[in-house]
Amino acid sequence: MDLITISEIIGAKMHSGVGAEETSLVHGHYDIECRDSEGNLLWSDGFDNVVTISGKNELLVSGVYALTSYMGLISSISFSAVSGTDTMTSHGGWLEASSTNAPGYGATRPAVAWSATPTAAQLVSSAATYVASGASGTIEGAFIVTGTGASATVGTTTGVLFSAGAMTTPQPVVNGNTVTMTYTLNLT
C-alpha cells in the first residue's frame, strides 16, 4: 500500500497549477430616514456596514432565511466606531439607543423579515419603524442581531451581532419623530 503525505499533496497541487478558486464577499447597506409628527422628511442617509466575523459564521451555518433577526439603533453617546470583531456582548465603540442612551424608541427592536431578490442579495421585506419617545438624542448608526438567542428587547446582549454600521453624518431625533430603516445584504 502506497501512502502519500500531506506535504506531497500540497506540493503536487502547487506545482500542477490545477484548481479552482472562488471568492465571496458579504456586505450590507442601511437606508434610514426621519420624519416629524406631520410626516415631513427631516433627514435621510444611506451607509454601508461591517458584517461581523460572528455574523458571517452565523450566515454560513444557518442561512439568512432561517435567522431570527432584529434591527436596533446606535446612539451617539460614547460612540467611537463599529468593528468587525464586535459582538453583542462586547462592542466597546458604541451603545444601543435606548431610554438610557437617547434617543429612546421603546422597549422592543423591530423584527427583520428577509425577502429574496433575483440577484445575490437579500433585503428586509419591510422597513423597520422606530418612534422616538422620551429624551431627544442623536442616531449614530444601526445594527442587526440574529440567531437563536436574538432578542427583540432593547438593551439585551444575547444573540449574534450580524452587522453594524455608522451613518455618514450622525442625525438628531426628537420625541415624536419616526425613523424608518431598510437593509440590503449582498453576497458577491
Image: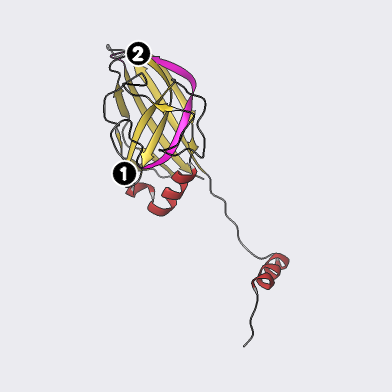
What amino acid type should be assigned to the residue bearing mark 2? Ser
Name which residue lies at 42% across and 36% down: 184
Q: Main secondary structure of the magenta part?
A: strand
Q: Nearer the viewer, mark 1 or mark 2?
A: 2
Does any portion of residue 24 appear in the rendered image?
yes
Residue under numbered circle 2: 136
Q: Is residue 172 left or right of residue 108?
A: right
Residue 54, position as x, y percentages in the image: 46, 45
| Upstream in sequence: badge 1 or badge 2 | 1
- Quick check: 10 above or below 116? below
Which labelled disc corresponds to residue 68?
A: 1
Q: Is residue 97 magenta?
A: no
Residue lying furthest bottom: 1
The quarter of the image holding the N terminus is bottom right
Residue 41, position as x, y percentages in the image: 36, 14
> Which residues are the magenta region?
159-177
Query: How far separated are the C-alphas under marks 1 and 2?
Result: 30 Å
Please identify the quarter of the rendering in which residue 129 is found: top left
Name which residue lies at 46% across and 22% down: 78
Q: The residue tagged with tag 2: helix, strand or loop?
A: loop
Name which residue lies at 51% across and 38% down: 84
Please identify the quarter of the rendering in which residue 36 is found: top left
Q: Give 120 or 1, whichever is nearer the viewer.
A: 1
- Quick check: 69 above or below 10? above
- Quick check: 131 above or below 36? below
Residue 127, position as x, y percentages in the image: 32, 30
Q: Give 67 or 16, whichever is nearer the viewer.
A: 67
Does any portion of residue 120 appear in the rendered image?
no
Q: The residue tagged with tag 1: helix, strand or loop?
A: loop
